[in-house]
Amino acid sequence: MSGKSPSNGVPDDANERELIDLEFQSMVEGLSLDESAPTTYLDELEKFEDQNRFTAPTPPKVGFHESIVRAINSFKKWKNGPKHHDDDGVAL
């Protein structure tokens, strides 16, 4: 476009402005400016984090008698193990 109408030599700024306005309106028609969405980006992010959070497994509960039996067996295993107890039992 040369900026002038070929018929009478008058600038066609009004026609260009009208074309720009029509193009802008066609782009804006597809947009939704409704802010009453049920969730926001932060809500979705929080929900994603809640779903992907690590949940430690809960071991099965052991009765009192079973706890005592396990403690006795552990003590026997420790006592009957290697005879050099010069440390606290921790191995690196």
Image (tube, rainbow, N blue to C red):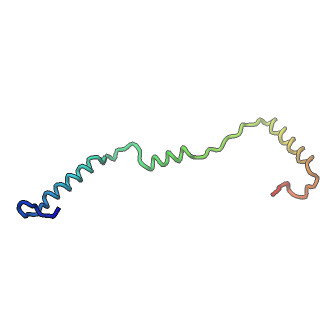
Q: How many callouts does the rendering have?
A: 0
Residue ranking furthest to the left: 8
Q: On the image, which quarter does residue 56 sit in? A: top right
| Position of residue 40 measured from the top left corner of the image (x, y, whole percent) | 41, 47
Query: Compared with residue 40, is residue 4 higher up or lower down, i.e. above or below?
Result: below
The image quadrant of residue 67 is: top right
Q: Residue at x 79, y 36 (%)?
A: 64
Image location of residue 73, percent across then percent down: 87, 41
Q: Nearer the viewer, residue 40 or 62?
A: 40
79 w.r.t. 11: above or below? above
In this picture, is 76 found above or below 2?
above
Which quadrant does the N terminus fall into? bottom left
For the view shown, which residue lies furthest in the front direction?
6
Q: In the image, what residue occupies the spot 87% across and 58% down?
A: 87
Left or right: 90, with 12 as reference point: right
Q: Is residue 8 left or right of residue 52?
A: left
**In the image, what residue occupies the spot 16% across and 58% down?**
16
Instruction: Locate residue 13 relative to residue 25 in the image: left or right.
Output: left
Query: Looking at this rendering, what residue extends furthest in the right direction?
Result: 83
Residue 61 image offset from top left, x and y in percent: 73, 37
**Which quarter shows the C terminus?**
bottom right
- Give the answer, above or below, for where 82 lies relative to 3: above
Which sits in the foreground, 44 or 23?
Answer: 23
Residue 4 location (% of width, % of height): 12, 63
